[in-house]
Amino acid sequence: MMEYQEGLRNNCENTTREEMINQIKSLKFSIIELGLYLDTHPEDKKAICMHKEYCKQLKDIEDKYQKMYGPLTIYWPCNKWRWLETPWPWERGNY
């Protein structure tokens, strides 16, 4: 898993919007799963390090995504609502 996540981070600069979203989803899943594991194994130092690293990677890729494409959530500061400028998912025809 660590090698997969490392590959995600290294390829972040050359990815498409869809690939970046998939990387964000993958990191969020990994963070949640590690958090659940750490609920029952709080002394596992390797899992703690992985959790911290994945959180850092998630923050980095979310920041890059949001600078390129606009906010993912209402919590990211922006000067305008960029999602109003692009077609909504159902308007793109990519279901």
Image (spheres, grey):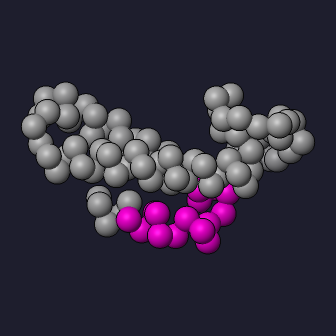
Q: Residue furthest right?
A: 85
Asked whether the viewer can see residue 26, the reply is no
Percent across and percent down for residue 23 are: 51, 54
**Image height check: is 64 above or below 74?**
below
Please provide the residue range marked out in magenta: 6-20
Quarter of the rendering containing residue 12: bottom right
Name which residue lies at 27% across and 40% down: 34
**How many numbered discs, if any?**
0
Specify whether 71 is left or right of 46: right
The residue located at (52%, 70%) in the rendering is 11
Vertical position of residue 60 compared to residue 88: above or below: below
Find residue 50 and report its horizontal and vertical position in percent: 27, 50
The answer to whether residue 85 is visible is: yes
Q: Is residue 18 magenta?
A: yes
Name the residue: 86% across, 44% down: 86
Q: Is residue 82 left or right of residue 11?
A: right
Q: Is residue 54 above or below residue 19?
A: above
38 with respect to 58 (left or right): left
In front of the other: 68 or 37:
68
Relative image position of residue 26 (x, y in whole percent): 44, 49
Q: Main secondary structure of the magenta part?
A: helix
Quarter that holds the N terminus = bottom left
Question: Residue 65: x and y, percent?
Answer: 65, 52
**Residue 79 forms part of the magenta stretch:** no
- What residue is at 83 percent from the left and 37 percent from the top? 79
Residue in front for this viewpoint, 30 or 76? 76
Q: Quadrant of the C terminus?
A: top right
